[in-house]
Amino acid sequence: MKNLLKLVCYICLFAAFCRYVSSCDKKPAETVVAASDSLSAADSLCINSQPKSIVYNLPCRVTDINPQKEGKALLVFFLHGGCKEHKLDNILDTKGNHLMWESANDSIKNYLGKKGIKAVVVEPVCSKADSWAGHAADIKQIADDYVASGIADASRIYITGTSDGGVGVFDIVNRYPDVFAAGISVGCSKRDAAVPVAHSAEHSGKNFDYMHRTEALDSLFANVRK
């Protein structure tokens, strides 16, 4: 009988350990949203088990971080580089739209996850224009829908980008300064901005080191739009 009880205890401890390891390795939930041929599609995204209707006017990858947290989420856009090289046949293409080979976006997600910050990271694809300036209204539409749906905090919307995406950060915040709290622009020339935009001209291959720096992300997310 004692041996049986010991066996049961060992099994319970092993199961608890497995759950712990699984929770440590669990990645944020990612959703790939493909827009229709007309580039205007309403897709249902489930946040906190509550279906919310968000209109995506361009293909996006959406990552839900710490959804179990209470309250509204911080909303972050990441704009890829290589706008003239985009490919629509696979929005996770490692070369065509630079989503995967630029690890800067993963640094942002890891930072938010480790800090325990509830957030949604939206990575759109520059799919119908040669620059992000042509998608400014589309990105604003997504931000507006997240706020209207009650998912995102209107005072904590951020935009980041590398290379062509870095140029897009300046274009979009200057067009819609009442939407974004702050931004980070990497791998392009610096321009004046209507909201705080941290800038680094370095273009160090796939790493874009500036966005790997904790202090840079601390500074970004400390901004709250009034």
Image (spheres, rainbow, N blue to C red):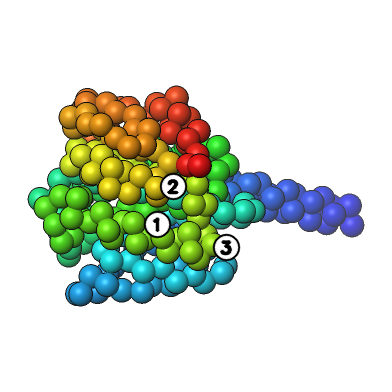
The residue carrying mark 3 is: 48
| Residue 21 % position (x, y) | 58, 45
Residue 103 in view of the camera:
no
Q: Amino acid at mark 1?
A: Ala
Disc 1/disc 3 C-alpha distance (Å): 18 Å
**Relative side of 49 to 148, left or right:** right
Q: Residue at x 34, y 33 (%)?
A: 197
- Residue contact at pointers 3 and 2, CB within 8 angstroms: no
Q: Residue at x 72, y 54 (%)?
A: 11
Q: Residue at x 69, y 50 (%)?
A: 16
The residue carrying mark 2 is: 157
**Relative side of 158 to 165, left or right:** right
Mark 3: which secondary structure?
Answer: loop
Mark 1: which secondary structure?
Answer: helix
Asked if residue 129 is positioned above or below residue 20 in the image, the reply reads below
Asked if residue 78 is positioned above or below residue 206 in the image, the reply reads below
The residue carrying mark 1 is: 143
- Residue contact at pointers 1 and 2, CB within 8 angstroms: yes
Label 3 crowd bin: few (<14), some (14–19), many (20+), radius 10 Å = some
